[in-house]
């Protein structure tokens, strides 16, 4: 009996030490994460964030820290970037062409195959009534003992910020998320994909972009009030 109690105490001490030494903490119920440019609410307490979030929040102005799932191997990040002409020009053009893999498939390059990318897709979606370009690609890794894969998603949107003093007030909203899985366990991959898509959908539904110049966006035909966010089928 004493041995059992001693083992239980030892396990408790190890657990507490691990929790205290971890650089992360679980998010609080309905916790709102925010930065200078945006804010959003986390889906549930299954996610964790860097413990320095509160202390560093005012300095980490572009966006919030990465969120990682406590149990599953996945994470997502919502942030803003300065405007980049080559990558984001179309997001400020009303009638710009957006690639949609339902219409036209992406042709793989030699570099894609060499780096283990098995496929690439693109789609159109809307965040806060902004028209955005979405992309997803999958990369395999491992060998005979373990065959793994990582699925990367990225959504990019352009908007005008009333406080931005360069690039004519243009900024970029970015939503990155990904999950790792065993390619020999398709059901596991499907479950993880649904978990992270659900978390991103909740974050997007509560997302507030601060200082967005809505009047200018409306004037240039860049607000789409009849559209809502839809996750990709891939």
Image: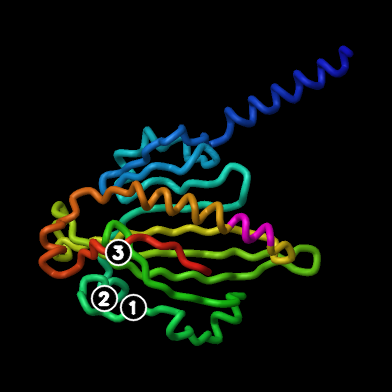
Residue sitting at the far front: 226
Label disc, if present, on residue 227 of the rendered structure: 3
Q: Which residues are magenta?
A: 187-192
Residue 65 percent location from the top left of the image = 42, 46
Viewer-side residue, 112 vs 133:
133
Tell which tag, 3 or 2, sits nearer the viewer. Answer: 3
Tell which tag, 2 or 1, sits nearer the viewer. Answer: 1
Tell me the element at label 1.
Answer: loop
Residue occupied by mark 2: 90
* Vertical comparison of 89 with 214: above or below: below
Tell me the element at label 3.
Answer: loop
Tell me the element at label 2.
Answer: helix
Tell me the distance, in whole angstroms, between the alpha carbons under discs 2 and 1: 8 Å
> Contact, CB < 8 Å: mark 2 with mark 1?
yes
Viewer-side residue, 46 vs 144:
46
Q: Is residue 55 left or right of residue 96?
A: right
Taken as a whole, is the magenta stretch helix, strand or loop? helix
Seen at 31% across and 51% down, the residue is 62
Residue occupied by mark 1: 98
Closer to the N terminus: mark 2 or mark 1? 2
């Amino acid at each position: 009996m004493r041995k059992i109690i001693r083992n239980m105490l030892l396990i408790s001490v190890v657990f507490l030490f691990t929790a205290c030494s971890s650089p992360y903490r679980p998010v609080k119920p309905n916790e709102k994460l925010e930065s200078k440019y945006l804010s959003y609410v986390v889906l549930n307490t299954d996610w964790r964030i860097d413990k320095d979030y509160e202390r560093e929040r005012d300095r980490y102005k572009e966006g919030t820290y990465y969120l990682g799932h406590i149990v599953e191997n996945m994470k997502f990040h919502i942030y803003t970037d300065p405007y980049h002409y080559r990558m984001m020009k179309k997001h400020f053009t009303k009638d710009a062409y957006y690639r949609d893999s339902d219409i036209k498939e992406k042709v793989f390059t030699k570099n894609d195959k060499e780096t283990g990318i098995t496929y690439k897709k693109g789609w159109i979606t809307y965040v806060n009534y902004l028209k955005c370009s979405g992309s997803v690609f999958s990369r395999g890794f491992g060998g005979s003992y373990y065959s793994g894969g990582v699925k990367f998603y990225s959504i990019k949107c352009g908007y005008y910020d009333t406080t931005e003093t360069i690039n004519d007030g243009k900024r970029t909203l970015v939503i990155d998320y990904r999950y790792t899985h065993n390619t020999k366990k398709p059901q596991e991959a499907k479950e993880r994909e649904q978990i992270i898509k659900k978390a991103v959908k909740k974050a997007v539904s509560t997302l507030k972009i601060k200082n967005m110049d809505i009047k200018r966006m409306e004037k240039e035909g860049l607000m789409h009030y009849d559209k809502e966010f839809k996750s990709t089928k891939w």
